Every structure is written in structure tokens, then in C-alpha cells.
Amino acid sequence: GENVEQHPSTLSVQEGDSAVIKCTYSDSASNYFPWYKQELGKRPQLIIDIRSNVGEKKDQRIAVTLNKTAKHFSLHITETQPEDSAVYFCAASPSNDMRFGAGTRLTVKP
Amino acid sequence: NAGVTQTPKFQVLKTGQSMTLQCAQDMNHNSMYWYRQDPGMGLRLIYYSASEGTTDKGEVPNGYNVSRLNKREFSLRLESAAPSQTSVYFCASSVKRTANYGYTFGSGTRLTVV
């Protein structure tokens, strides 16, 4: 089955700096790569996704890039704000299910 | 429009007891999923139902059973709870037909087995 690895496990940045989280996947059949944000005690919520026929996607301060050849994808958050502090999960979906990375705890210091 | 509703929100079980976690969605989604979340391990797939009438095992199915009761409801049953099943359980649904789409998650069930 699909295996997703995510790095780093923790990330601390100053407000206004950029944050980058990286993931790799193992199954070349994966064609859908979403990112979820989970605040403490809350449910995961979809923040951005990308499909395998696209190399990059942006939504305001958030962007995701995908390198199919290398089987890795990344989340980029620019101009970070304290409310960006949360756990972020990447995921990869080859067919009927989705496998998640172990998560990155992002802390944005004011 | 409630989205995905899970019950109960909290539960404490004794080892060997059984219980069923309930999940219902009102978005007319085709696919439903059960995940468990443990510290440092992300979300691990227990079982999923790609469409009404079908269920399949995920990464960690041992000790669990599921029922896709109808298009709206997907329940998870622990027949004989063990301390290793202490976790936060999330139900999710997706509109998925031929292409993959993002999941909508329920608010979770925090289960403690003592």
C-alpha cells in the first residue's frame, strides 16, 4: 500500500517568515495530494489539494508543489501568522483510500 | 447541513467490553472512512466504504468491524476492546466517484480503554 513520509515533525518560525513542509510517497499510482490543517482538539480540515496533472497550485498565502518523478510534494506558507499554528498533514491517494503523513507541528512565534 | 456527525464524543470502556461508534453524513457523499489518530502517528485508516454496500480493510483493521448501513451511515464496532485501541477516532466522507476528492471529517470520538 501507499506509504507517506512527512518532514519535519516540528517547525518553529517567526511571524512573517515562510514555512515549508515536505512529503514523499511511494505509490506511483497516487494521483491526488491534499493537505489538512488540524488545530488543537479539532478535526482535520482541508486547506489545499493538488492533482497529479498539475505541478503547482496557489491559494493566497498557501502553495503546494508536486514533483511526480521524484514522488514528493511540498506545502509552502508565506507571511506566516500566529493563527497558522497547528498540525499539518499531507496525504496521498492512489485509488479508493487515502494515506496520511505523520504530521508537522507548526508554531508561529509573534 | 451538519456535515459529518459522530457519536459519542467521549467514551471510557473496560477491557473486553464492546461498543459501536456511529457516523452519519448529510452531504450525499459516496465514500466513507474510519481513521484512528495516535500521537506522532498521524491518521491511520481502519476501514473504508467506497460506495454503499461495500467495505474494505485499511492499514489497521484488526480488532474492528464496520457496517455501511445505508448511504448516510457508516459504523465502527469494537467487539472486545483492548488498551491498544485507546485513541481518537475520526469518521470522514468524500464525494468520490471516478476521481479522488478531499475528505470532510467528523469531530472525532475520544476513546479510552482501561
Image (cartoon, coloured by chain):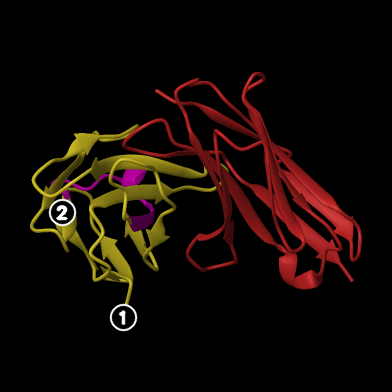
Chain colours: A red, B yellow
Left or right relative to B9: residue A59: right
Q: Quadrant of residue B80?
A: top left
Q: Amino acid at mark 2?
A: Gln
Q: Give yes or no for residue B87 being in the magenta stretch.
A: yes
Q: Nearer the viewer, residue B114 or B91?
A: B91
User: For residue A67: magenta?
Assistant: no
The answer for which chain carries disc 1 is: B
Q: Which one is in front, B28 or B44?
A: B28
Instruction: Let me know if residue A51 appears in the view.
Output: yes
What kind of element bears circle 2? loop
Q: Is residue A6 left or right of residue A60?
A: left
Give the residue number, with chain letter if any, for mark 1.
B1
Is B27 drawn above or below residue B15 in the view shown? below
Q: Which residues are magenta?
A: B77-93
The structure residue drawn at horizontal position 87% and vertical position 54%, both measured from the top left corner, is: A18
Q: Residue at x 26, y 41 (%)?
A: B47
Q: Is residue B114 visible?
A: no
Provide residue A47's location: percent of width, then percent of height: 59, 59
Residue named by callout 2:
B17
Q: Amino acid at mark 1?
A: Asn
Dot 2 crowding, Cα within 10 Å, few <14, some 14–19, many 20+:
few
Rendered location of residue B77, percent (x, y): 16, 51
N-term-proximal mark, 2 vs 1: 1
State which quarter of the image contains the N terminus of chain A: top left
